[in-house]
């Protein structure tokens, strides 16, 4: 029997902030190469236990937020069936999804595409006022890069291109011609 939570009058006194989130990856060293060398994360911890290893990484611009990278079966309470289910969800790109904010979606796209990441969506203008693009990391996790649109930016479906500088990202899907039916995570749109 589940307990019904009491209504909260106000959360303003709680002063909540996100401090970390966990992302399952197949290979920690491969994931580290992508998040550090392509996206600019820094390593904060690299912890090896008896049966598991995990890393925390973060963006220099967000010292209070960390992304924990670990294998999908790293939870000691996970049964072999749980581990298999997580591996299957990862293979389908359904287990993890991160959204990054950037001040230049097109430059981020060029930088990440040049590094060899799998493109899921080239930069396009969305109806909700953002310009975004999406990739998969080496483990198949969906990574979306969003930029608030400025007045006067003219986007084309399928995307224009900007400069080739490294992305400027903040922590918190493929090109139509490459992937005519991208697989979005639940509750997210693909145009």
Image (spheres, rainbow, N blue to C red):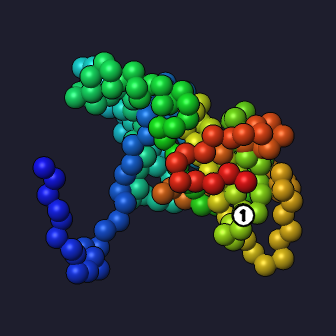
* Number of numbered callouts drawn: 1
Q: Residue at x 39, y 43 (%)?
A: 22
Q: Residue at x 76, y 63 (%)?
A: 125
Q: What is the x, y in percent for residue 160?
A: 86, 56
Q: Is residue 34 toward the left or the right of residue 147 in the image?
A: left
Q: Is residue 108 toward the left or the right of residue 48 in the image?
A: right
Q: Is residue 85 above or below residue 166?
A: above
Front residue of this view, candidates 57 and 184 = 184
Q: Is residue 143 above or below residue 5?
A: above
Q: What is the x, y in percent for residue 121?
A: 73, 46
Q: Residue at x 52, y 48 (%)?
A: 186
Q: What is the x, y in percent for residue 79?
A: 27, 22
Residue 19 occupies quadrant: bottom left
Q: Badge 1: few (under 14), some or many (20 or more) residues near its Cα, within 10 Å?
A: some
Q: Which residue is mark 1?
A: 126
Q: Is residue 106 visible?
A: no
Q: Residue at x 60, y 61 (%)?
A: 101
Quadrant that contains the C terminus:
bottom right
Q: Secondary structure at mark 1?
A: loop
Front residue of this view, candidates 186 and 136 = 186
Which residue reaches farthest front? 1
Q: Is residue 191 visible?
A: yes
Q: What is the x, y in percent for residue 12?
A: 29, 80
């Amino acid at each position: 029997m589940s307990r019904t939570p009491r209504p909260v009058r106000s959360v303003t006194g709680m002063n909540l902030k996100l401090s970390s989130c966990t992302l399952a990856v197949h290979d920690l060293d491969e994931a580290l190469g992508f998040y550090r060398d392509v996206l600019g994360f820094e390593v904060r911890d690299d912890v090896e236990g008896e049966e598991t290893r995990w890393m925390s990484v973060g963006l220099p611009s967000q010292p209070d937020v960390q992304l924990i990278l670990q294998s999908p079966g790293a939870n000691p309470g996970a049964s072999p069936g749980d581990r298999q289910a997580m591996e299957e969800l990862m293979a389908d790109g359904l287990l993890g999804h991160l959204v990054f904010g950037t001040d230049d979606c097109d430059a981020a796209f060029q930088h990440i595409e040049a590094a060899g990441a799998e493109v899921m969506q080239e930069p396009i203008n969305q109806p909700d006022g953002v310009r975004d693009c999406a990739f998969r990391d080496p483990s198949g996790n969906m990574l979306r890069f969003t930029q608030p649109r400025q007045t006067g930016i003219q986007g084309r479906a399928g995307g224009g291109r900007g400069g080739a500088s490294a992305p400027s990202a903040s922590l918190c899907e493929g090109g139509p011609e490459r992937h005519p039916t991208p697989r979005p995570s639940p509750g997210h749109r693909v145009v």
